[in-house]
Structure formats: C-alpha cells, structure tokens
Image (spheres, rainbow, N blue to C red):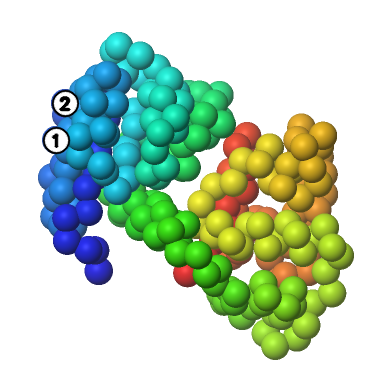
C-alpha cells in the first residue's frame, strides 16, 4: 500500500517514544528520520525533505508551535502534532500555526498510520490540479461539480449554507477542520468566532444526511477543536 521510502520526520525528545514509533513505522516501509529538539527538527526538515512530519509540542529547546510556525514559513509538508491530553489549547494553537492534524498521547499505532495516510493523500491531492468532482461514502454522494447531494439515490435539499459546509468538510475528509477555518470558509472572516452557528448548522446537516451525533458515520465532533468528516 505504502510507496517505498516515504520519509517521516519525527521531532520528539522522548527517546522511548521515538524508538517505539520508529519500529512501528519502519515496518510499514516508511523511512524515519529522527530529531530530538526543535532546532534539530528544523535542520533535518531542510536536509531530508520529508513527506510528513510528526511533531511533539513539548520540546526541550522550543515550543512545538514555534517549530510548526517556522516550518510553515517555507514548506507545505503535512504536520501531525503529537500532544499530551492536557494540551488542548496548544493543539488549537498548533493547528492555527499550520499543523494539519493532531494525535493525543498515548499514541495508537493503527490510528497514527491512518492519519499519516490521510496526510499523504491530501498533500498529493494538493499537488494535483484537478479536483475530484465526486465524493461518495456510505450511501452519501456529493457531486461537487453539479452541487448535487444524494443519500441512497435520493436527492437532498440543502440550503446554500448547508451545502457549503458539507462541501468544505468533504473536500478535507479524514482531516480535522478547526472551527475558525470552517466559519471563515462558510460564513466569512467576520464570523470566525461564532461557533454557535456551527453547532446549529452541523445539526441541520446531520439531520438531512441521516447522521447521528451520538454514533456518527459521517461527521465527527472533535470537542474544542473542530469537525472531521469520516470518509474513504
Ligand atoms: Ca516531549
């Protein structure tokens, strides 16, 4: 499944975790480059041009958020933040600084591998100029070219806002989208803090696409962070 030698840069000061991740990811044919400080990570990012970066937030010499900000000055490589459970605010800050996703420690290997695959797929897609016009998952079909949404072959009547919201989520399926980003994309810059809108419209959207917030099959709530569309 995995292309040989996709390079994963691992910026993490805890040697135990580095070794654990190295051994589990090497088995998937990823090539792992390790850095144990922020400065070392920035240097290695320049040297090895990684395909994906795993970034710890608590580094000895600088905050992982600063590392993300500095990486984003010059590279678009997907960054997956590795954070401890009590760092919710830092997670948001890291995402705002340009990280693409986050994982909470302790890290599950299967989940990490899935997130890496998503990150790689998105960066490949970004490099492909033609947008995928059709999205389909579990009976739900979103035709982005014709702005048509069907559920089990029945056409759904979505309001323009609901459609915009769904289309935005679907285009980034698998990836967590921050509240702020969604609000800006759907309602505009001046609404970027109106998380109430999201709660209301996500509920409308869920009702129409037959999703259950308690047991979601399409839209996953990431409390305090944003939403993730489950796809593929
Ligand atoms: Ca650490």
State whether residue 115 is above or below residue 3.
Answer: above
Q: Is mark 2 within 8 Å of ligand 1?
A: no
Q: Quadrant of residue 131?
A: bottom right
Query: Under tag 2, what secondary structure?
Result: helix
Q: Position of residue 157 (x, y in %)?
A: 84, 74
Q: Secondary structure at mark 1?
A: helix
**Residue 17 visible in the displayed image:** no
Please give the name of the residue rendered at 29% of the width and 20% of the height, measured from the top-left corner: 38
Location of residue 125 (image quadrant):
bottom left
Q: Residue at coordinates 32% horizontally, 45% vertically from top-left? A: 52
| Front residue of this view, candidates 113 and 217 | 113
Q: Position of residue 13 (x, y in %)?
A: 23, 22
Q: Are the residues flagged by discs 2 and 1 in contact, CB closer than 8 Å?
A: yes
**Mark 2: few/some/many CA within 10 Å (<14, 14-19, 20+):** few
- Reading the image, the residue beneath label 2 is 15
- Residue beneath the point at 47% across and 42% down: 100
In this image, 48 relative to 174: left or right?
left
Tell me if I can see residue 178 in this picture: yes
Circle number at residue 19: 1
The Cα atoms of the two marked residues, 2 and 1, are separated by 6 Å
Instruction: Locate residue 75, reporting x and y percent.
Output: 39, 38
The relative height of residue 93 versus residue 110 in the rendered view (above or below) is above
**135 shown above or below 65:** below
Q: Nearer the viewer, residue 174 or 61?
A: 61
Q: Which mark is residue 128?
A: none
Q: Residue at x 77, y 37 (%)?
A: 189
Image position of 130 (left or right of 198):
left
């Amino acid at each position: 499944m995995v292309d040989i030698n996709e390079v994963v840069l691992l910026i993490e000061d805890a040697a135990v975790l580095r070794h654990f991740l190295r051994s589990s990811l090497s088995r998937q044919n990823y090539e792992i480059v390790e850095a144990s400080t922020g400065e070392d990570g920035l240097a290695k990012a320049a040297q090895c041009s990684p395909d994906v970066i795993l970034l710890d937030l608590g580094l000895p010499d600088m905050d992982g958020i600063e590392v993300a900000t500095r990486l984003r000055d010059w590279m678009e490589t997907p960054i997956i933040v590795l954070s401890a459970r009590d760092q919710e605010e830092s997670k948001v800050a890291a995402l705002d600084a340009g990280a693409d996703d986050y994982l909470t420690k302790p890290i599950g290997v299967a989940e990490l591998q899935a997130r890496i695959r998503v990150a790689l797929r998105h960066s490949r897609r970004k490099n492909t100029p033609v947008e995928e016009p059709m999205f389909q998952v579990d009976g739900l079909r979103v035709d982005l070219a014709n702005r048509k949404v069907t559920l089990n072959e029945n056409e759904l009547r979505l309001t323009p806002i609901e459609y915009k919201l769904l289309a935005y989520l679907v285009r980034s399926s698998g990836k967590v989208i921050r509240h702020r980003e969604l609000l800006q994309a759907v309602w505009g810059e001046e609404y970027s803090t109106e998380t109430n809108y999201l709660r209301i419209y996500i509920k409308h959207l869920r009702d129409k696409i037959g999703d259950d917030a308690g047991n979601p099959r399409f839209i996953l709530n990431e409390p305090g962070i944003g939403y993730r569309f489950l796809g593929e």
